[in-house]
Amino acid sequence: MNLFRRILTALLPALALSAGGCFTGVESTPRISDADVNRIQAAQLTPEQQFLTGIASLPPSQWRPGRTWRVANDRISLIFTSASDPADALAGHTISYEGENRALGLRGEDGVELIFRSDDGRRLFYRVPGMTRERFDTIPALDVPFTVDLDIVARLDSAMRGRTYFVRTPAWYTTGTRQAVGGLRHIPVHIDSVGPGDENFPAAVYFTVTDPQYASILPAGATSYMVYMSLGDSKAATRNFDTIFAFDNPRRRYPEIKDDVWELIIRSRLRDGMTRDECRLVLGAPPLVTRVPTYGGMVEQWTYTDGVYLYFEDGFLTRFRQ
C-alpha cells in the first residue's frame, strides 16, 4: 500500500500537466484513468507474478479446427447433447474442435453448438448454455467443462521447460501414480516438462531435484516429482506460478537465519522461538492475523485455513498447532 501511495503521488503532477497544461486546483482536476491504475498495479507485481501473464486461452472466435483438450473427468458426458455419439469413459482421451453449428434455443434465440471429435472417433456436440451467436464472437474466453486446454499446457511447457526455480510448496506428487508426498521448500529444482493436470489445476509441472544435498533426504526414494499449477486470476487460481516457485534463492534474503533453523524451514517444520519471517517461510503468509492485548503485552495469532494456528509474543513463536 505504501508503494501504491508513492507511485500515485509521483503520478498526480504529470496527470495534472497533461490534463490542462497548468494545474491550479480550480481550473482543472487531474483524473486517474483505468490505464493509470493498471500501470500502478503492474508496478507492484513481483517478477514471478508477471512471468506467465501473457499466457491465456484464446477467444473462441479464434479457435481453429484441430485445437485439442484433454478430458479430465467422465462427467463431461453430461454436457453433450443426445445427438452425440456415446460419451461414456472419456477421461484421459483428447477431444478436438471441428467447428460449430447454429442452434436455436427454446425461445427461438440464435445459439451456438460446438462440434468435437474424440481421439477414438466419437463425434460430440456441446450446446453452450445461454450463449448467443453475437456473444460467442465477442467473449474473451470460453472453458470447455471437465477438460484441460492443451494449447495452454504447450505454451507453459515452452516457457518453463529446462529452467531452474526454487520451489515454495511441499505439496509434491510422484510422477507416475501422482500420489501425494511431503516435499521440501525453498530448494532448487530443474523443470523437466509441463503436462496436463486436472480440471481444477490445468498444469502438472514435472521437476527433478539435482542437488545431492537435498536428493538424499527426499521422500519416496526418488528425485523426480510434480506439482499442480493453476493459471490466471479466477477464484480457482490458487496455485499460480508465484505461489509455487521463486526465481531467486530465498536463503540469500535471510542471511540472519541460522543453518539449523533453515533446515527446519525447508522441511516445513516449526519450533518455539522462531521469528515471524521464519514462520512465514515455513507456512506461507497467513490468511488471518489477530492481535489481542493481554496483561503480558500484545499477543499475535496467525490462523490458516487447514486449522493450523501460531501465537507470537514479542515477535517470537511461543505456541502453535501444526
Image (cartoon, rainbow, N blue to C red):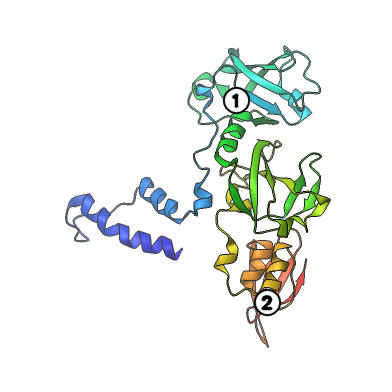
Q: Quadrant of residue 64?
A: top right
**Mark 1 sits on what residue?**
130
- SS class of the residue under badge 1? strand
The amino acid type of the residue labelled 1 equals Gly
Residue at far left of view: 22
- Picture layout, residue 128 above or below residue 287: above
Q: Quadrant of residue 11?
A: bottom left
Residue 5 image position (x, y, % from top left): 39, 63
Determine whether, in the image, residue 104 is placed left or right of residue 50: right
- Picture layout, residue 17 above or below residue 93: below
Q: Residues within 10 Å of mark 2 (few under 14, many from 20)?
A: many
Q: Nearer the viewer, residue 229 or 21?
A: 229
**Distance in Å between CA atoms under marks 1 and 2:** 52 Å
Residue 168 appears anywhere in the view: yes
Give the number of the disc on residue 59: none
**Mark 2 sits on what residue?**
312
Residue 104 image position (x, y, % from top left): 60, 13
Residue 259 image position (x, y, % from top left): 67, 72
- Picture layout, residue 3 above or below residue 208: below
> How many discs mark residues in the rendered view?
2
